[in-house]
Image (cartoon, rainbow, N blue to C red):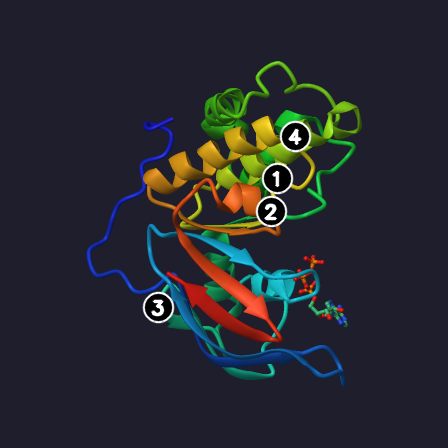
Amino acid sequence: MEAFYDNDFEEDAPPVVHFENVGVRYGMGPEVLRDLTFSIEPHSFQFLTGPSGAGKTTLLRLILLAVKPTRGLISLFGQDVSGISKNALTDVRRRMGVVFQDFRLLDHLTTYENVALPLRVQGKEETSYRAEVVELLRWVGLGDRMHVLPPVLSGGEKQRAAIARALIVRPDLLLADEPTGNVDPSLARRLLRLFIELNRLGTSVVIATHDFSLMDQLDVRRLVLGDGRLHIDE
Ligand SMILES: Nc1ncnc2c1ncn2[C@@H]1O[C@H](COP(=O)(O)OP(=O)(O)OP(=O)(O)O)[C@@H](O)[C@H]1O
């Protein structure tokens, strides 16, 4: 895996994510998040937590530029994203891997094809990535499930396929929304080890979760949302 994953560490790299007084509302509704000011540093590991409806998914969508802030400034990898060009936006998005709550696997593609899809979309030739995809699938324990379609995978297998698909682009930032929501505690621990290993190899990791037993396994920073505001437990 080390060979597969060789992120360079830059000294004095800018924060991966920086928010300055960010607020967001949906349509004409109330602000669901307000006055968010925080940074996510390169190579850092944090949980994002808070009660259901507190805005964890909304915060991840702001980072993904899937939702626009109604006020404030967002920078990603040192770049202010308001008024960013389409090409620069594509580059920024390519540096992020995402594991969605509902996996979003394509049912007509095999596990292998799902994981390879982000590379195919980038226009890469299969010969250039095939070995990498197979290695990663083995690494997440799906070596023998490569050629089946997602509907026959268990919840935990789908989760690992979604995680592998997020990792295959070797992201500088991994955002995972309740990545252990559908698995038993022992698999949750295994998945957490996977994220720790990824972080060790250089990726900044943000895991959104309600699961205190998961968070209690690691003494890392917690970004806690409540009443629309962010509180940070260092
Ligand atoms: N598309 C939308 N349109 C209108 N309101 C929305 C939309 N998405 C989320 N909201 C509202 O924004 C608030 C934050 O929702 P969000 O899904 O971000 O919370 P969450 O912390 O991720 O919740 P959960 O833990 O239940 O997934 C909630 O009040 C929700 O109803």
Q: Which mark is residue 78?
A: 3
Distance CA(mark 4)–CA(mark 3): 38 Å
> Measured along the vertical axis of the image, is residue 180 above or below residue 149?
below
Ligand 1 within 8 A of label 1's CB?
no
Distance CA(mark 4)–CA(mark 1): 8 Å
Tell which circle, 2 or 1, labels the residue nearer the N-terminal end. Answer: 1
Ligand 1 within 8 A of label 3's CB?
no
Taking the image in four quarters, ligand 1 sits in the one at bottom right
Q: Residue at x 67, y 30 (%)?
A: 156
Q: Residues within 10 Å of mark 2 (few under 14, many from 20)?
A: few
Distance CA(mark 3)–CA(mark 2): 31 Å
Q: Is residue 17 left or right of residue 118?
A: left
Identify the image quadrant of residue 80: bottom left
Q: Residues within 10 Å of mark 1 (few under 14, many from 20)?
A: many
Identify the image quadrant of residue 147: top right
Distance CA(mark 4)–CA(mark 2): 12 Å
Query: Which amino acid does the dot numbered 3 rest on?
Result: Gly
Give the position of the C terminus as an image quadrant: bottom left
Can you identify the residue that label 1 sits on? 180
